[in-house]
Amino acid sequence: MGTKSNVTLPLIVSGHVIGALAFASMRVERPWTPDVLNRLSVVAQVFANALARKRTETELRRVLAENARLRDRLTGENVYLRNEIRARRGREITGESLVMRQVLEQIEQVAPTGATVLFLGETGTGKELIAAAIHERSPRAGRAMVRVNCAAIPGSLIESELFGREKGAYTGATTRQIGRFEVADESTIFLDEIGELPGDVQVKLLRVLQERQIERLGSPRPIDINVRVIAATNRDLERAVAEGTFREDLYYRLNVFPILVPPLRERPDDIPILTWSFVDEFAKALGKRIESIPKEQLLALQRYAWPGNVRELRNVIERAVIVSTGPRLIVEPPRARFNAARRSVRLTDVERDHIRAVLEKAGWRVRGRGGAAELLGLKPSTLEGRMAKLEIRRPRH
């Protein structure tokens, strides 16, 4: 160790060469004494510790960031899960009409897949309930479905609600907010009234559907997500595309599996079933006992056009149960004058209503003297054919 040497000394710590630092890659032109070796060992250990700390701090920051993201998502998911439980109490799809059986068949077909679903139909027809049925029959059922009413959120806030924001992203953004898409990761998001989305948000939603990534406002870092999208609208999206208010490429991305939800006036045979379903729900909630509904009142409910659809029927039944004082429920549709002003003018609806009215007048007799066929001036077989096509059947009580 007392000899002189010209040696380049590499300091190798944890598989990495420490160069361009003190004592690293140095030429030693003196005897290698124990003191020199001790000093070199100390320097090597200092650098090893520094490198280890840097790696530990980097990993710690990464873990903390991931934990914060998961904590935010879990907090948001818990909020939506509580709302989901409240929304689902006492609610299920009810209906035995042909049109509803067709909808139920479509639900069973698409639920196990990951396909995007688009519900079309009037407001109040139960699109949200059907979306929940699809989610509950899917492999994602273990997590809460996230609901967003695009028409209820101001246009200036919808982007941060959907995709989230970082603190300071804009004036008033004092905290970080996780978006609904991030909350719905590995689950389903239901975008109701999607036809009301502003144009700039439509562009970003299209990118989410294409790339399966979101970016929080104020952050350029993309976040991978795995979300199934179910959308609904009461607007004519094809017309909106033609008018330039809805993006054509987004429409085709959403319209993978369209389902038309029929209005309540096209499924009158379901009205008694729905009525009793709502009666049971509200009677239980209010601690009341309802045993019967007068036949003439059920018939009046079936004759009403229900412009507000299932939602309107539910509200009418709730009010009736609240004011009821005995086991016999008195329930009437909204005023006839309002009904007449809002009644559908479609030919099939007018024909259906007229045939039903004549059948009721004839006591639901089709054939014979005084029967509905005679009153309508039709052959009995012709009337029966029209009844089958229009799904007119005698109500069951």
Image (cartoon, rainbow, N blue to C red):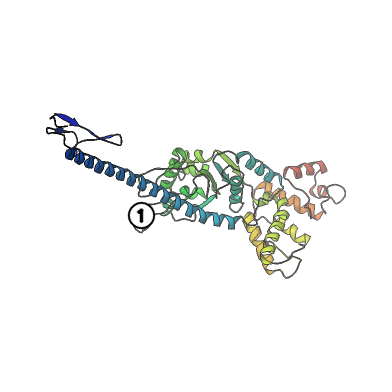
Work out whether residue 369 can be spotted: yes
Q: Could you classify mark 1 by the number of other residues whose Cα lies within 10 Å: few (under 14), some (14-19), or many (20 or more)?
A: some
Q: Residue at x 85, y 52 (%)?
A: 370
* Residue situated furthest bottom in the rendering: 325
Image-based side of 113 in relation to 208, left or right: right
In percent of width and height, residue 396 lies at 78, 53
Q: Residue at x 75, y 69 (%)?
A: 326
Instruction: Between residue 145 and residue 313, name the one nearer to us.
Output: 145
Label 1 sits on residue: 167
In percent of width and height, residue 160 lies at 41, 52
Q: Residue at x 54, y 38 (%)?
A: 256
Name the quadrant containing residue 30. top left
Pick the quarter of the image with the N terminus: top left
Image-based side of 41 in relation to 122, left or right: left
Instruction: Between residue 17 and residue 268, name the one nearer to us.
Output: 17
In percent of width and height, residue 7 lies at 16, 29
Amino acid type at mark 1: Lys
Instruction: Between residue 282 and residue 270, name the one nearer to us.
Output: 282
Work out whether residue 341 can be spotted: no
Pick the quarter of the image with the C terminus: bottom right
Element at label 1: loop
* Residue situated furthest front in the rendering: 2
Eyeballing the image, is 166 above or below 253? below
In percent of width and height, residue 49 lies at 28, 44
Image-based side of 360 in relation to 164, left or right: right
Instruction: Between residue 354 and residue 260, name the one nearer to us.
Output: 260
